[in-house]
Amino acid sequence: MSRVMAFTSTLVVILILSPITHAQDRQPGAVYDFDRTGEKPEPAPKRDISGTWEPAANAGAGIAGGGAPLMPSDGKPEHQPPYTPEGLKAFQSHKPTNGATKVDIHETNDPLPACNPQGFPRIVLHNFRTSRILQTPDNVVILYEFNKKWRVIWTDGRQLSKDPENPTWGEPDPPESRWWGYSVGKWVDDYTFVVESNGFDDRTWLDNGGRSHSDALHVTEQYRRTDLKHLEMTITIDDPTMYTKPWVALKLLLRLQAPSFDIHEMECAPMETDAYNKAMQFTNSPVGSDSGK
């Protein structure tokens, strides 16, 4: 195992299993707002969110070990999502390794440490760092650093299906659900792109705090280009099975990086994660076992 790969795997394990983060950690080669104090904002281009983006404050700004950044699992009443009785029961059945209800790694039933797909929106509510947005006439593609995942957001005029198991756009033999959902997007003005997603696999969690969702989950993303260098991302959760009303989970300002910026590799590799756990004397590691639903 190369030193770079060993470091990457170790970092992935730490970020999955620990709420620890360093406020001034930075991605090598990235530029943050504190690097450009006094910078005069330039006008934003119209209908353009393409490029490589990094949390504007620092590399740790997008990491939320304790749950959704605007609704962390810290035990405070004001940070409790508006649970339905079913939603609260589901939350109480989860055993996360972060947040107010955290347990030891040996007791967790979080599917993520076993390298199962974390799905959307968890990928932006936990360990969200660098992303790259690509625009074409028919879709927008978002590439995520963590676990090298990607999503397609359709912009060709199709509507979000009311029945994700039978999409209206004629997909042959569609799956019952998807880890990343079905997504469609549109421009509501020259600087605001809105995405609607449904059709999610309910085996994933919303965040590291153990919040639940059902197959009725509907996620709204808003990407607002505030100026040439910045993009504001907002994530809203709507799941009538688990929550009595929609709630905002994240509002994060991103900064545009140079076209030459290289996104670093962060993979959840069971063979390397298991070796790390053994080296750290984590016995009965959930990696490689069915620790999920």
Image (spheres, rainbow, N blue to C red):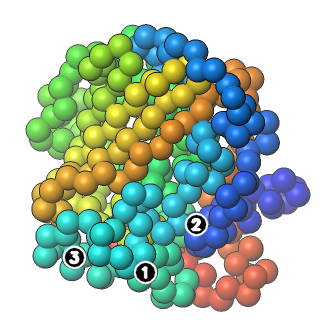
Proximity of marks 1 and 3: CB atoms separated by less than 8 Å: no
In primary-sequence order, the first of circles 1 and 2 is 2
Q: Secondary structure at mark 2?
A: helix
The residue under label 3 is 88
| Rendering coords of residue 36 (x, y %) | 72, 31
Q: Is residue 81 above or below residue 158?
A: below
Q: Residue at x 79, y 36 (%)?
A: 29
Looking at the picture, tell me which residue is in the foreground, 225 or 215.
225
Q: Is residue 73 above or below residue 144?
A: below
| Rendering coords of residue 242 (x, y %) | 18, 65
Q: Which mark is residue 100?
A: 1
Inspect the image, locate mark 2, and give the three-letter code of the amino acid beneath it: Ile
Quadrant that contains the N terminus: bottom right
> Does 35 sit left or right of 95 as displayed?
right
Quadrant in the rendering for residue 196: top left
Q: Residue at x 73, y 54 (%)?
A: 25
Q: Is residue 184 above or below residue 138?
A: below
In the orientation shown, which residue stands out farthest toward the front?
Answer: 38
Tag 3: Cα neighbours inside 10 Å, few (<14), some, or many (≥20)?
A: some
The residue under label 2 is 16
Q: Residue at x 79, y 42 (%)?
A: 28
Q: Is residue 292 above or below residue 217?
A: below
